[in-house]
Each structure stands twice: as structure tokens, then as C-alpha cells.
Image (tube, rainbow, N blue to C red):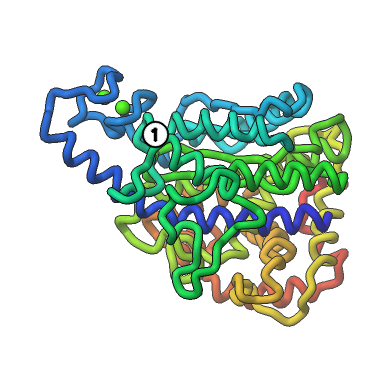
Amino acid sequence: MKEYSYDLLTITLLLFTLILSCSDSENQIQDNTSNLTEQTDADTDGDGVVDSEDAWPLDSSMSENLWGIINNEDVEFFFANDVSENIAQGTRDSFLEAIDEFGNWGPTELWVSGPGKDGSVELANLYCNRRVERGQVKFQSDSYPWTLESCMQFSLYPTLGYDLIPPEHISNEEDGSIYNEEEGTLFEYYRGKSVMSIENNLPTGWGKSLNGERAWGIKIFNFSLPVGFGEPGYNFDYEKVNVFYEYFHALQESAFPDDALGDTYEFGENTRRGPHWFYSGASTYYAEYAVRKRDENHNLNSLKDRIEQQFGYAMCDNILLSDLTPDSECFLMKFYWGMPAIAYLLDKANNQNAIIETFYPNLYEYGFKAAFELTFGITVEKFYDEWEIYRNLPMEKRLEIIPDI
Ligand SMILES: [Ca+2]
Ligand SMILES: [Ca+2]
């Protein structure tokens, strides 16, 4: 269980970093767009839609912006050549099941790494050809143009050197220290996590993330080898929970079509995104809930037992949910208390789907606090008071509100 928790921390940190890095590429794409719209009848990407009407004039696979709209776009799966067929099958099946459960917030690409270096280079090559061809840039300047070579360096850092990567992407401006030198970036990072998952015989793969680029209009997931899909049983079902957890982020991120209303990137009660405990608690709860609900013959423990475990993992006793921020040593409690806090709220709303049906569809327009009140009928401040009472009840009482699945 411990591995799972650390895994989630890694995921969230990555997600956050990558979301923050979106703004550069967004500017770049806007620049390209404004140049292109001058030639009104050109169809630069040859998809049959003229540039002026094409939301993605450099991406031949898309012509309209579907971010935030449930759609029928395909999921594209990319597996490294050393991912076994049964693990690939488990990944595909679970991912499609998660989409069936939470809605298709595509278009989506899922890239699954294995432990081998050749496979990793092959994936990065395919990935970068696509990014360059579709004008999906991470950086762009006269000194550091976005090319197949610079994308490859950036996606396999530090294995191919770093002379083509802008220094601010790999080093700390203040002290000049280099980031990620040991763990590497993207495909090198996930390859390393695949090796680590195999060597340590982990029950489930360490490392999954949504590197969604709102500016590109697509969701991109990266997984290290999902070792839990090796054979049916408890670990297989837990790997499925991890996939559901990660995919739930697609639903969460789809709530923010753009940043025009502001505050969609930062976490906190007073932002549009909301606090960490809610974001991580909702994804954890829905993953654990949905996998059990969908298959009564699942191999997991009961949801009640799972909630009891979460309370048991909590490493701090007297901390407010609102203080569970990255600089807190109790930060992982955003999962341990976040999950039961969400369970409490859903029980209060008397609807297990309240967060999916009411909260997220209204979040962008209302902001966190008002969407919260709309969904659960109480203010977040009032809820914090109720939470203090709830978490101090005897365990048996706390578990009464948890669905029996
Ligand atoms: Ca076009
Ligand atoms: Ca297009």
C-alpha cells in the first residue's frame, strides 16, 4: 500500500509541473495561429478545414477544440517494444473501462514505457515526430528551435545531452543546479521507473501521469510498466484502480476549458481549482469506488476496509485539511484523509456521482467555494467543522456512511 501512496505523490507533482509549463507552448501556438490566419484560404495541415476555421491549423488529426466536451475521439495506445502482450492488454482494457466510467474526455494518447533503452528511444522518436509535425511545442526560439532533435533530447534527458534544451527547462536559475539528472525526463524517467518497479518486485507500477496540454487540445498519459497487469488477482485490480485514478484527472482537467476566468492552475480554497485534499481525494475515492462498483467479484478489500486503511496511514493527527499543502510534512494525507472526506461529502449529497454530475460541470463558472456549496449544500468552512467531528467518531461509526462494495 505504501508504494501506491508515494506513487500518487509523484504523479501529482509531475502533473503540476507539467501544467505550469504549458504557458510557453500556448504562446507559441497562438503566435503560429495569428501568422497563419492572414492567408485565409490556406489549409496548412491538409485536413480539409481552412486555417481560419481550424482550431488546430498545424494538427491534421484535429480541427476543433474538444477540451471540456465529452466526445468520441479515439484513444491511441503506444507501448514500448518490451511491454508484454498481457500487460498491454490489461492496460488497454482498464483504460477503456475508465473512459466508459468517467466519460471520453479525448482525444487521448497513452504512452507506456518498459525497462529497455531501445524501446524508450523508439517511443520518444515516435512521440517527437508527432509533436513537431503537429506544431505542439515545449519551447521555441532562435537559439533553441523545437525540432525532432531538441524534442528527443528534452524527452530522453540526460541520455542525449542537453545542448539543444533551453537552460531554464533543466536547471535552476537561482543556483544553476541541474534538475532531474538522476531520474531523467519523460521517456527516460518512465523507463527508470519501469526498471525500479521490476527490480523491487513492486505490486503495481510506480509512476503514471497526465501530461495534458490544454494548449494542444489533447490528453497525453505516460505510464511506467504497469507490472500489476502481469496476472489476474489483487495486484491486477489495484493496477486498475491506479489507471482509474489517473484517468479521473482527465475529467478534472476538462473542467477548465481555458484560463480566461483565472485561477485554474493554483491549488487552494480561493482558487477555481480548489485545495489539494479535494483534488486528490476525489480522484482516489472515485477510482477505488468505481473499480469495486463495476465488478462485484473484484479481488480487492471492501471499500469500508480501504477507508479504514486510509485513516490508519495518516501520519499527523492535528492538522486541518486546508493545511495539506506541498510544504507540509503531512502532505500525503491529502489522500489518506482526502478520500474519506470525499466519501463524507458524497454521503451528504446523497449521490455518489455528485462530484461528477454537479461539482465539476460547474467548477469553472462558479469557482471552488461556490461549486462546493452548490453540490453539497454547505459551505466549505462549515464542512471543515463537520469533518473535525466526523474524523473523531469511533471507526465503526465513520464506516457507516461508506458504500458496502
Ligand atoms: Ca486545416
Ligand atoms: Ca487541423
Image height of 168 relative to 189, above or below? below
Q: Is residue 290 visible?
A: yes
Give the image location of residue 228, x and y in percent. Answer: 81, 38
The image quadrant where one finds the N terminus is bottom right
- Is residue 310 left or right of 258 when viewed as pictured? right
Rendered view: 321 above or below 20: below
Residue 347 visible in this rendered orientation of the protein: no
- Residue 191: x and y in percent read 68, 41
**Looking at the image, which residue is at 80% across and 61% down?**
310
> If the image is split into quadrants, where does the C terminus sit?
top right
Q: Position of residue 113 (x, y in %)?
A: 66, 36
Q: On screen, 170 above or below 201?
A: below
> What amino acid is found at the position of numbered circle 1 in the picture?
Val
In front of the other: 363 or 351: 363
Residue neighbourhood size for the residue with mark 1, other residues' Cα within 10 Å, grouped as few (<14), some (14–19), many (≥20): some
Tell me the quadrant of ligand 2.
Answer: top left
Residue occupied by mark 1: 132
* 237 or 170: nearer the viewer: 170
Which residue is painted at 63% across and 72% down in the image?
324
Q: Is residue 90 above or below residue 316?
A: above
**Quadrant location of residue 81?**
top right
Horizontal side of residue 133 vs 395, given as left or right: left
Residue 20 picture quarter: bottom left
Classify mark 1: helix, strand or loop: helix
Q: Is residue 59 left or right of residue 97?
A: left
